[in-house]
Amino acid sequence: MIKIKESPHKGIKEGIRKLAAKSYNDHLDIYKKRCLIESFIGTTKGMYGSYLEEKDQDRAFNVVFAQLALWNIGNIIFVLFLVMVRKGIFKQPPGQLTSAGERV
């Protein structure tokens, strides 16, 4: 929504524009968060495409919800893997290995 500049020469005359200006001023804190929502939607479209081929709205919602849930699960697993690497869980104990895989 484009903010309307009030001046002595140009006032808001149409009723619907007055209502829009009032709504904008009343909910300014929500409008300031719009960029976060738009970036989330843009990122999601970039990952999964900009449209779905589902025939009804409920199924489309379920597909999008499942995709986002799987993406979040993947991120959690990745973070857990990084924590495990950082703690040294995957390090080999000291010692030499023979060709048969036994320690000397």
Image (tube, helix red, strand yellow):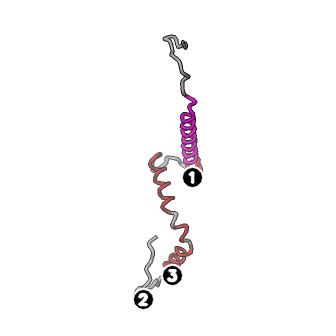
Residue 83's spot in the image, x, y percent?
56, 38
Q: Can you identify the residue that label 1 sits on?
A: 57
Left or right for 81, reference 12:
right
Three-letter amino acid code of the residue under disc 3? Gly
Q: Earlier in the sequence, mark 3 or mark 2?
A: 2
Using the rendered view, name the quadrant where residue 104 is placed: top right
**In magenta stretch: residue 60:** no
Residue 52's spot in the image, x, y percent?
49, 48
Q: Earlier in the sequence, mark 1 or mark 3?
A: 3
| Local secondary structure at mark 1 | helix
Q: Main secondary structure of the magenta part?
A: helix
**Which one is closest to the eye, mark 1 or mark 2?**
2
Seen in the picture, residue 55 relative to 25 is either above or below; the reply is above
Left or right for 72, reference 47:
right
Residue occupying image coordinates x 55% and y 14%:
103
Q: Can you identify the residue that label 3 sits on?
A: 15
**In magenta stretch: residue 69:** yes
Q: Which residues are magenta?
A: 64-90
Seen in the picture, residue 97 relative to 75 is either above or below; the reply is above
Q: Can you identify the residue that label 2 sits on?
A: 8
Residue occupying image coordinates x 53% and y 71%:
28
